[in-house]
Amino acid sequence: VRDLALNPSSLGLLTSAYFLAFAAMQLPVGILLDRYGPRRVEAGLLLVAAAGTLLFAIGRSPFELTVARGLIGLGVSSCLMAAFKGFAQNFPAERQASLTGAIMASGGLGALTASLPLEFALPLLGWRGVFQGLTFLLLAVAALIFFSVPQREAGVSRDSLGAQLKDVGGILAHRVFWRFAPPMTLVTGGFLAVQGLWAVPWLMNVSGTSRAIAAGHLLAMGLAMLVCNLGVATLATRLSRAGIQPIMLLSGGTGLTLFCEGAIILGLGPTLPLWAGFALFVSTGTLAYALLATLFPPALSGRVTTALNLLAFVGAFGLQWGIGLAVGALLAVGLETATAYRTAFGVMFLMQAAAYAWFVLEGRREAA
């Protein structure tokens, strides 16, 4: 912001380019994963991500950095989905929820580095140096995946492109898909928008914290997500055998997510526990991928999960940019900064509550 003199709208567009490119790649990634397997697809796309981080490190204009963010989003667009495809190829259905928790816990370790560790690294490396380091890490991981991950033929589709696209249409037309889609778009997507950009401005402008304390909140959020995902990884299979199904964890977790978010918006209670709870409970949303994939044939698993992920990142892009537009517009008409943020977040919350209500009502209809 300081180096490029960005306003809230420009910042929202620059950062949300990641989500736009990520979302645009989801259906193609699903087709590629189902056709070529996760090893080749993931290793190749990480090279694109490395190109994006390198451009971000050397970019000199908002346009160049926006393009770089888009390349990063495109390049990492298969990271989680490739893991899900590999799980579907290699493990039985009853283990999918636990494996989902395990891979999300792995991702949580990465999220932790974007909090206090990054705060400590910035004075030493600068933001450009951080992205140069990411370039080398991405190249190393791409090589590791390509040369170490086995290539499996189970769950690989050799249908024509036309047939694969027809299958995507069948997925998108299925009513059960649209039970999971609205909360994934608005609740999970909304959290991505907030965690990825607006949490720190909220904490500094609404809660009045310093940047260091805001970074501490991000660390607490990352740890909470890690705790939730580790819990799912270790307990989901056992809980299922005890009668507590993953769908129950998903529904209850989403409800508690909205409770914490509503309390944050209204300013009720201490900020750190509420933000940590927000991150803890929203992490149950990743169970939707495994739950939905088990309702379709294994050869469709890549396209099922990427279609759902597409909506999560469409929501993240729209809400991250939309919050910036809304805050900027409300400030322009004379609202105080805190009021502008509360209003923008409040509108998002109402949409999320409606999506959750749809999810619950559809579940009751299916059970009837």
Image: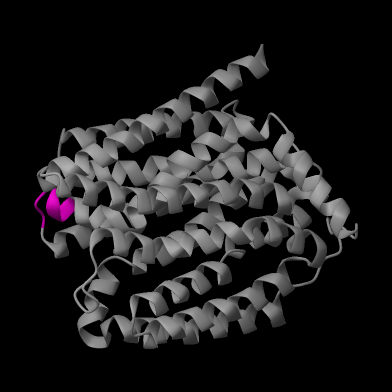
For residue 366, above or below residue 114? above
Left or right relative to 52: residue 6: left
Please tell me whether residue 151 is drawn above or below residue 258 in the rendered image: below
Depth check: 68 or 213 in front?
Answer: 68
Looking at this view, is 342 or 366 the one in front?
A: 342
91 sits to left or right of 328: right
The percent coordinates of residue 359 (x first, y second) are 54, 26
Q: Position of residue 1 (x, y in %)?
A: 23, 71
Observer-nearest residue: 151 or 102? 151
Vertical side of 251 occupied by 308: above or below: below
**At 54% from the left edge and 76% from the top edge, which residue is drawn?**
49
Residue 203 appears in view: yes
Where is residue 304 drawn, in percent x and y? 70, 47
Q: How is the image coloured?
A: one colour
Q: Is residue 248 left or right of residue 268?
A: right
At 90% from the left edge and 59% from the top edge, which residue is drawn? 160
How many numbered badges does the structure rendering display? 0
Residue at image location 58% in from the left, 78% down from the top: 48
Report whether residue 224 is seen. Answer: no
Q: What's the residue at 61%, 52% (across, down)? A: 99
Outermost residue toward the front in this view: 333
Looking at the rendering, the stretch of residues picked out in magenta corresponds to 203-209
